[in-house]
Amino acid sequence: MENFEFFNPTKLIFGRDTIGRIGGEILEGGHKKVLLMAGRGSIKRNGVYDQVTGSLKDSGIEWVEAWDIRPNPVLSKVREMIEVAEASGVDALLAVGGGSVIDSGKAVAAGLYMDDVWQAFEAKQPILKAMPVYTVLTISATATEMNPYAVITNEAEKKKWVVHGPALFPKASVVDPSVQVTLPWHQTVNGALDALSHIMEQYFRGRGSETTLAFDEAIFRSIVENTDKLQSSPDDYDSRASLAWGATLAHNGTSGAGLGGGDWASHGIEHAISALNPEVAHGAGLGVVFPAWIEYCKEADPRIFKRWARNTWDARSVDRAIAAMKAKIRSWGVATTLAGIGVDGSQIPEIAANAVEFGPIGVIKKLTEDDIINILRLASS
Amino acid sequence: MENFEFFNPTKLIFGRDTIGRIGGEILEGGHKKVLLMAGRGSIKRNGVYDQVTGSLKDSGIEWVEAWDIRPNPVLSKVREMIEVAEASGVDALLAVGGGSVIDSGKAVAAGLYMDDVWQAFEAKQPILKAMPVYTVLTISATATEMNPYAVITNEAEKKKWVVHGPALFPKASVVDPSVQVTLPWHQTVNGALDALSHIMEQYFRGRGSETTLAFDEAIFRSIVENTDKLQSSPDDYDSRASLAWGATLAHNGTSGAGLGGGDWASHGIEHAISALNPEVAHGAGLGVVFPAWIEYCKEADPRIFKRWARNTWDARSVDRAIAAMKAKIRSWGVATTLAGIGVDGSQIPEIAANAVEFGPIGVIKKLTEDDIINILRLASS
């Protein structure tokens, strides 16, 4: 087992009817006025907005609203919101939405103390300080509600990059799975695919970490099983809750403990795809890339891929497990080819070049531009 | 799934050769002088003491030493150490040892700000403040290195009770599994039994929490498997590390997420046993009590006990699983009867009375004094 640190100071408040607690948490944090950041209005339709603002009122917290954060959130929007936050004199941020909204919240939080927040994404400047971020999660996928990561797309430069730092852990996050009952099915699935990918990015680095590997297999199976259940019973609370908690655990530090930091090549490739195709949902992109990546890399460490095949798909070989995974993804109504998610094969060289801007990616197998072209070709059929 | 909060701000530093980092952590916390609390000297024999004090020296941290904390740590010792801490003007505590030493550290930390720390155990006064506690763990068992609990025995009143509060989370804990290679076998096993019990106390409350149940089964199996491996290969690092991380996860908030707080009746009964028999190790006591408790309570919720039988012991019935668990415990060289751990049957009424001092205990099945007598009789054969 590799050495690791586990540090995660986020307070997670999980369950039915918990959104009303957010105001109290912000008050306890000593804050008076927040920037309420949100997406394109779904929280007004599903009642979350009313619960959040009601809670703020009850706790005497003032707020300013900043809307219209889109999926694959962009740097220009982050910069715009930094200005709003500065102008309105808030002392904390409240991100209400999915990964895009929360990641934007984190970027704003750091950007408030930097000349140019993109410097942190370029790894030219560390994040030393950030305004406290509180979150109310409306779609379980990225685990950003309980981790120190944020992914933002610099749309001018077509870079979808990640930033991290302990200051970016949310102070408190509320996850009420019952509000996810109204999600469109494809969003539920994309969330599940993102969570499964987070587990796999770490799992395949597994050597001598029996406890973590067993844990990862368990939440992997639970996510698959509960996504299945939600396909037929979208309003089943326990399945929503198990999927939601599985997604948080998939990337809050637990699933990678002792696994040496994971691989993350599939994420790198997917980020290149959606940097060039902002309409591609992250989870959907991962559903296409990951099976192809496994197919391409399976000989690099046969032991761990065979274990995964056996313990997560009850499959006798890695090939059978890949087939089972693709069949499962298709049964969820999601494409498993680039064309199926609207990406033309002619883009493959550009995607590959984008992914290796800083050189080869991946750990289990170092992937050059040519390797990534090969993987994307596998993902084309 | 039940609502839950997950909040655990302890920084866990896990792995080989990590003890040397403790001084830096204490320095980063802004402290100048610590009370180094320890047991009866094993840390001088296994090199841990030298690593710890070397690290303190390197970081310019002064220290005062307080030794001789025993298993089943007692209130009189805690009170003595509170006086030492006050007299020596330390600004943090450094507990170096197993659960007894760390729990004593937490009790001292809280007691420094109370007229009488036992008031907190009696639940007559909450813990509002505590001196920061740092730990270096030398035996994996209780997960106290990453939770807000402490168990202390008031030897005058024969009460082995627990206290908790967010202020009791250690600031930072170092777990170097390699130092556990020198543990006597029975201590390794008692640690494993304690960890398995922590999982079971929570697991059997499982309803609608698939992710947590699957997770619990996975770490349960991993702990059993790695304890088996350590029996034949005590110096296998990966097995030590998997057992150690499993023990931490078994009681750091993760294993009980969504399970409504667990049951804890077996712990209550064991605490009564070792309050009256301080020579009984907690893990050994649990190894006797838990199979009997399952036997007695299995009809209260057949679904969850059957699931446990199938998913942790590959057993077709609960009775077969109980038999498998007892056989496993015996194969580890540990007794599964009260007599085997040196407790005479004549003590049963007194133990039962001690356990229900505040009324019936347990949730899955409320246990009266008579119920506990019946369980202890089952534990006699």
Image (tube, coloured by chain):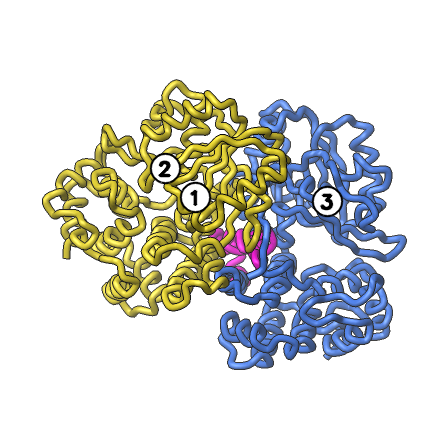
Chain colours: A blue, B yellow
Residue A250 among magenta residues:
yes
**Badge 1 sits on which subunit?**
B
Residue B194: give its label. Answer: none
Residue A274 among magenta residues:
no
Give the label, 3 or 2, closer to the camera.
2
**Badge 2 sits on which subunit?**
B
Who's the residue at 27% across and 53% down the image? Answer: B290
Residue A317 image offset from top left, x and y in percent? 55, 81
Q: Quote the CA–CA distance across marks 2 and 1.
A: 9 Å
For disc 1, the marked residue is B97
Q: Quote the CA–CA distance across marks 3 and 2.
A: 56 Å
Q: Which amino acid does label 2 sit on?
A: Ile
**Other residues around mark 3 within 10 Å, as few (<14) / some (14–19) / many (≥20):** many
Who's the residue at 47% across and 46% down the image? Answer: B137
User: Quadrant where the N terminus of chain A lies?
Assistant: bottom right
Vertical relation: B381 (above or below) B169: below
Q: What residue type is labelled 3?
A: Gly
Residue B8 image offset from top left, x and y in percent? 52, 41
For disc 2, the marked residue is B69
For disc 3, the marked residue is A39
Q: Give the range drawn in magenta.
A: A230-258
Residue B102 appearing in the image:
yes
The quarter of the displayed image where residue A91 is located: top right
Residue B7 image offset from top left, x and y in percent? 52, 40
Who's the residue at 82% across and 28% down the image? Answer: A87
Q: Considering the numbered disc 1 on the image, is that residue within a helix, a strand or a loop? A: strand
**Residue closest to the eye, B222 or B26:** B26
Q: Do the residues labelled 2 and 1 touch (CB within 8 Å)?
A: yes
**Other residues around mark 1 within 10 Å, as few (<14) / some (14–19) / many (≥20):** many
**Residue closest to the eye, A12 or A205:** A205
